[in-house]
Amino acid sequence: MKASPMVWTGRVLSGLFVLFMLAASIAPKFLMSGMVAEQNLEPLGWPAKYLLLIAAIELGCVVLYIIPRTSLLGAILMTGLLGGAIATNLRVEMPMFSHVLFGIYLGLFMWGGLWLRDDRLRSLFPVRRSAA
């Protein structure tokens, strides 16, 4: 069966989300842990010892999100993680649109991509048009 343009758009959005998480969040934590901890975690009030744990949790959520059978679970778990990131940035009074709300932006890509590519999710959360 040929995938519709909507499904392909969802795959692209999901792919962009996954690429961003892998390249900009997970990989630096594993590959440059000392620098990342010093520059990013400690100013937020997180001890450096949690860096690899956070990276592993992020990686686990992304892997679950990539697999079609577990993508909903991955999205739900990642939503919790993004909520924690939002709360952490809010607590230390980071800039609103560039830092605090960045988790919202990522969540929109993640959930939007999943909604577009998964008809079961679309049936749970349909977009209804008003009767005019």
Image (cartoon, rainbow, N blue to C red):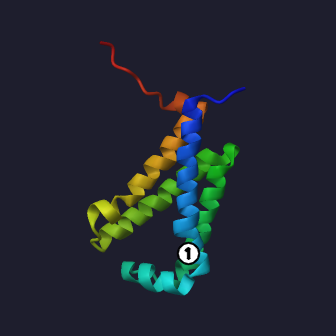
Q: Quadrant of the C terminus?
A: top left
**Among the 4 quarters of the image, the one containing residue 84:** bottom left
Whole-percent x and y of residue 22? 58, 64
Q: Nearer the viewer, residue 18 or 59?
A: 18
As displayed, is residue 123 above or below residue 61? above
Query: Which residue lies at the image location 59% right of the left edge and 42% below the top edge?
Result: 11
**Among the 4 quarters of the image, the one containing residue 68:** top right
Residue that numbered label 1 is attached to: 28
Whole-percent x and y of residue 106? 45, 54
Q: Amino acid at mark 1?
A: Pro
As displayed, is residue 48 above or below residue 125? below
Query: Which residue lies at the image location 33% right of the left edge and 13% below the top edge?
Result: 131
Q: Quadrant of the N terminus?
A: top right
Residue farthest along the right direction in this orientation = 1
Whole-percent x and y of residue 38? 45, 86
Query: Which residue lies at the image location 48% right of the left edge and 57% below the top edge?
Result: 80
Q: Is residue 7 left or right of residue 81?
A: right
Query: Which residue lies at the image location 35% right of the left edge and 69% below the top edge?
Result: 89
Q: Is residue 30 left or right of residue 42?
A: right
**Among the 4 quarters of the image, the one containing residue 10:** top right
